[in-house]
Image (tube, helix red, strand yellow):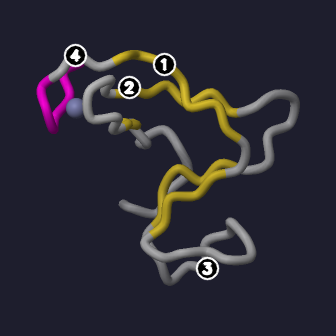
Amino acid sequence: MKCPFCDTEMLHGYLNCGMALWSERKHKLSLLPDGKEKYTLHLRQPILSPHQIESFCCPECKKLVIDTKDFENNLD
Ligand SMILES: [Zn+2]
C-alpha cells in the first residue's frame, strides 16, 4: 500500500495494544463511549494477549493507516 500522504510504500504490520477508543472527544477517566460522540476502534480489555490490529506504517512520514470497519463503532 502506498502512503496516501507522501506516496511512499508502507510497511505492513500490527498495532499491538490493550484497550483503545478512537473518539471525537478526549476521554480522561474511562474508554467507554457515552453515546453522544462518534467513535470507532473500540477495543475492550484484552483477555489473553494484546489486540493485534492489522495496519500500515509509513517509514517516511510515520503515519499509521488502520481500517476500522471490522471493529465496534457507531459511525453508521
Ligand atoms: Zn507517508
Mark 2 touching mark 1, by CB under 8 A? yes
Checking the image for residue 45, the label placed there is: none
Query: Is residue 38 highlighted in magenta?
Result: no
The mark found on residue 56 in the picture is: 2
**Which stretch appears magenta?**
1-7
Q: Amino acid at mark 2?
A: Phe
Between marks 4 and 1, how big is the CA–CA gap? 13 Å
Which quadrant would residue 21 be assigned to in this image? bottom right
Q: Is residue 6 left or right of residue 17?
A: left
Q: Predominant secondary structure in magenta?
A: loop
Q: Earlier in the sequence, mark 4 or mark 2?
A: 4
**Mark 3 vs mark 2: in front:** 2
Spatial distance from mark 4 to mark 2, Cα to Cα? 9 Å
Vertical arrangement, residue 38 with respect to residue 42, above or below = below
SS under mark 4: loop
**Residue 46 placed where, x, y %?**
79, 40
Pointer 4 residue: 9
Q: Residue at x 54, y 75 (%)?
A: 26
In the displayed structure, would residue 14 be above or below residue 31? above
Q: Which residue is found at the position 43% from the left and 28% from the top?
A: 55
- The residue identified by callout 3 is 34
Amino acid type at mark 4: Glu
Foreground residue, 57 or 68?
57
| Residue at position x 55%, y 79% in the image | 35
Quadrant for ligand 1? top left
Marked residue nearer the N-terminal end (2 or 1): 1
Between discs 3 and 2, the one toward the N terminus: 3
Q: Which residue is mark 1?
A: 13
SS label for mark 1: strand
The 10 Å Cα crowd at callout 3, few under 14, some 14 to 19, many 20 or more, is few
Query: At 46% across and 63% down in the image, what residue appears?
Result: 74
